[in-house]
Image (cartoon, rainbow, N blue to C red):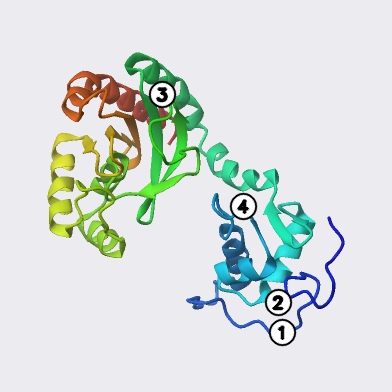
Amino acid sequence: MASPAAPDNPDNPATDASVEPAAAGTEKPSDTYVQSFARGLSVIRAFDAQHPAQTLSEIAQASGLTRAGARRILLTLVGLGYVRADGRLFRLTPKILDLGFAYLTSMPFWNLAEPIMEALSQEVHESCSISVLDGTEIVYVLRVPARKIMTINLSIGSRLPAYCSSMGRVLLAGLPDAELDRVLRATDLRARTSRTVTDIEALKAIIAGIRARGWAQNDQELEEGLVSLAAPIRSRGGQVIAAINISGQANRTSADEMAGNFLPPLLAASEKISNLVGLRT
């Protein structure tokens, strides 16, 4: 780790004696809530593709903490090996991946799903992904890319809004009505393209159709030129626990052509993975 900056440097992680208030917007819901742990996670989440290296002040602002609180957490993360300090800048280290892979390795049937995804991708010559629902977003847990088709760089851990993505709508279709309504009302419903549906009642109608037919189609609502199909992955009890999709380019394969040509192998793959999940859950 680099030597501490001069004491009068406002971004010096070694100097700040201010008293830390609660993080912005954070309330203690019960005695079981560990506020310091929540603050630590907020510091980790402050790093992203747009902000891979930040000063103490920048991290404090992004996480809603005081500089004193952010400093204590950062130095703890440095000591544990999850963050490194380069002069005034802090960066995550590869060790942070351990936290994400703990989720994946705790669900070993995803390893069994990957060969099925690879076979599907080779058959249709398009990218294939699996995601789960987390609040108003989907999180990618597996991905077999065929070629770059989006300006968004997608990989394991990537997040996209559920309301305007094919996998997101499949996952929303698996929710009870009351939970679906809560999620949609908590979502920032904005038009990402000229085709994006943002009206809650219209989205509910679309999701009702997905429930009835068992799969979802997306025609350039998430990004211009992107088309996709998605199907549910179910637990032994029939609960939707994940979604699998095929995504491609509209200038090569229209949404209707994708549904006509790729839906049968997609549904077959989702059924195979669901059967594997049923053996493990």
Nearer-N-terminus badge (4/3): 4
**Marks 2 and 4, the one that precedes in the sequence:** 4
Work out whether residue 11 can be spotted.
Answer: yes
Estimate the spatial distance between the alpha carbons at disc 3 and disc 1, rounded to whole Å. Answer: 52 Å
Q: Nearer the viewer, mark 1 or mark 4?
A: 4
Q: Which residue is rendered at x = 62% and y = 67% of the image?
A: 58
Are the residues flagged by discs 1 and 2 in contact, CB closer than 8 Å? yes
- Counting labels gives 4
Residue nearer the viewer, 30 or 226:
226
Image quadrant holding the C terminus, namely: top left
**Height in image: 273 above or below 51?**
above
* Secondary structure category for the residue under label 1: loop
Residue 242 at x, y percent in the picture: 36, 39
Question: Residue at left 60%, top 74%?
Answer: 65
Q: Report how far apart the C-alphas of labels 4 and 3 lie in the structure.
A: 31 Å
Question: Disc 4 marks which amino acid?
Answer: Pro
> Can you tell which quarter of the image residue 236 is in?
top left
Pick whichever, 9 or 56, lies toward us: 9
- Find disc 4 in the rendering and name its residue: 52
Q: Mark 1 sits on what residue?
A: 18
Q: CA distance from mark 3 to mark 2?
A: 47 Å
- Residue 247 appears in which quarter of the rendering? top left
Looking at the image, residue 111 sits to the left or right of residue 173; the answer is right
Dot in front, 2 or 4: 4
Instruction: Tell me, for residue 68, which label it has, or none.
Output: 2
In-image side of 2 versus 214 (left or right): right
Q: Amino acid at mark 3?
A: Met
Location of residue 15 in the rendering, given as x and y in whole percent from the top left corner: 80, 76
Q: At label 2, which amino acid type do we have?
A: Ala
- Tell me the quarter of the image containing the N terminus: bottom right
Residue named by callout 3: 117
